Amino acid sequence: MKEYKNILVPTDFSENSFHAVELGHFLAQKNNGRLHIIHVIDQYFFSHIEHAFDDEKMKRGRYDDAIKELNELINRIPHSNVQVSYSILEGKPFNKIFLYTKDKKIDLIVLSTHGKTGLSNVLMGSVAEKIVKQAEVPVITLKSNVEYVEKTNYSYRSTFAENWVG
C-alpha cells in the first residue's frame, strides 16, 4: 500500500468534517506524514450579503470566527507525532483546495461528503463532488453521521475500508 505523506482535510467545521480530520490524522500517524487542515471562506457566497453591510467589518468577523473554530478543531485532535499545518483561505472552495493540493504536493485528500446543515450542507456536497471528479490525487470521502475513529484509541483499527466511499 502506498504511503501518504501529505494528507489534506478541507473542513467546514461540521462534526462530519471532524470525522474526516480524525481519519486524516490516523493515516498521517500511520505513515509518519503531515496533516494539512484548511478552511476556505467562500467569498462568492458572502459577497451578496456584504453589500448591505460594512464589507471590511463583515470580512474580519468571518475570518475571526474561522480562526476560533479552527483552533477548537485542532484542540480536539489528540497529541501525537503528526505534524499539523492549517490555513484559512478565501475564494471558491474547490479552486482553493486544488491550488493548495498542487502547491503543497498533497498526495491524499480526505473529506466528508456533507457538512453543516442547510445551505452549507448542499455546498459541501457540491464541493466534495467536484473534488472527487477532478482531483489529480486519491480522494477518500466519508459519508455523514458515521464515526470513523474511536477517540480514545487510534491504534486498534487496522483498516477503514468498510467506511470508505472513493
Image: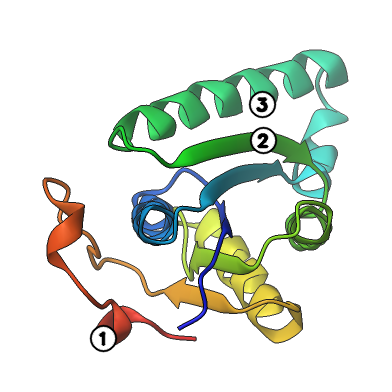
As rendered, which of 29 and 48 lies closer to the eye?
Answer: 29
Residue 149 shows in the view: yes
Which label's residue is closer to the chain start, 2 or 1?
A: 2
Look at mark 1 in the image and give the residue it sits on.
162
Query: Is mark 3 in CB contact (under 8 Å) with mark 2?
Result: no
Residue 67's quadrant in the figure?
top right
Q: Residue at horizontal 47%, vertical 24%?
A: 71
Gap between marks 2 and 1, in whole Å? 30 Å
Q: Which residue is at 77% across, 53% downward?
A: 100
Please give the residue where the numbered disc 3 appears in the rendered image: 62
Q: Position of residue 34 (x, y in %)?
A: 54, 48
Q: Residue at x 45, y 53 (%)?
A: 32
- The residue beneath circle 2 is 87
The residue lying at 62 percent from left, 43 percent from top is 39
**Label 2 crowd bin: few (<14), some (14–19), many (20+), radius 10 Å:** some
Q: Amino acid at mark 2?
A: Ser
Q: Earlier in the sequence, mark 3 or mark 1?
A: 3
On the picture, is 130 further left or further right than 34? right
